[in-house]
Amino acid sequence: MKKYKYKLETVLKYRMVLEKLAKNDYLKELSRLNFEKEKLLNLINVKNEIIENFDPSNKEKFNSDELVFFNNYLKQLLYLIEEQKKVIEEHNEVVKEKFNEWNEKRKGVKVLEKLKEKDFKLWLKEFDKEEQKFVDEVFIGKYVRGMNNEK
């Protein structure tokens, strides 16, 4: 009997490559999302540090220009924080899309792998039948020759 060969092996390999590419895209986007979250945390830390270090009771320390600058800087930081939150929200959607794409590719690969497994089991069953048939023929041949030798 012939060696086992899965008819859809090339399709399976192709889908595995597509699944791997989709997984890499997903991981890349997830990494970028984590980077954007880091940026947000840094902005929040800068804002908190500035607010902690600002003491409005000490009027001798700051003149009006510095207070205006401080206020504008704080407004700019708050604006950047809000913009970064929007970037993260948008990127969350991209990450979800990439995950869903990867998941669909993974399902396609799993389906073909299950088909391959079933196909192999059928081949193995057929192989066993062929092998049993061969053994039976050999046994019958020896039995018939043994009967002919006795006569």
Image (cartoon, helix red, strand yellow):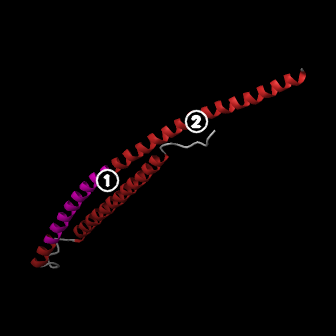
Numbered tag placed on residue 128 in the rendering: none
* Residue 52 belongs to the span the image colors magenta: no
Residue 86's x, y, as percent? Answer: 21, 57
Badge 2, how many Cα within 10 Å: few under 14, some, many 20+? some
Whether residue 117 is situated above or below residue 66 in the rendered picture: above
Q: CA distance from mark 1 to mark 2?
A: 42 Å
The quarter of the picture where residue 3 lies is: top right
Q: Earlier in the sequence, mark 1 or mark 2?
A: 1
Task: Identify the residue shown where x is 40% and y is 52%.
Answer: 18
Residue sitting nearer the eye, 11 or 111: 11
Query: Mark 2 falls on what kind of element?
Result: helix
Quadrant where the N terminus lies?
top right
Q: From the viewer's perspective, tell me whether residue 6 is left or right of residue 55.
A: right
Query: What is the span of residues highlighted in magenta in the rendered image?
Result: 72-97
- Determine which residue is flagged by label 2: 123
Q: From the viewer's perspective, tell me whether residue 79 is left or right of residue 49.
A: left
Residue 128's x, y, as percent? Answer: 65, 32
Task: Identify the residue shown where x is 37% and y is 49%.
Answer: 102
Task: Identify the residue shown where x is 73% and y is 28%.
Answer: 137
Residue 63's x, y, as percent? Answer: 12, 79
- Determine which residue is flagged by label 1: 95
Residue sitting nearer the eye, 98 or 141: 141
Q: From the viewer's perspective, tell me whether residue 145 is left or right of residue 47.
A: right
Residue sitting nearer the eye, 75 or 82: 82
Whether residue 24 is situated above or below residue 72 in the rendered picture: above
- The amino acid sitting under disc 2 is Trp
Whether residue 74 is situated above or below residue 19 in the rendered picture: below
Magenta stretch: helix, strand or loop mostly: helix
Query: Which residue is most to the left?
Result: 64
Task: Identify the residue shown where x is 33% and y is 52%.
Answer: 98
Q: Badges 1 and 2: C-beta atoms under 8 Å apart? A: no
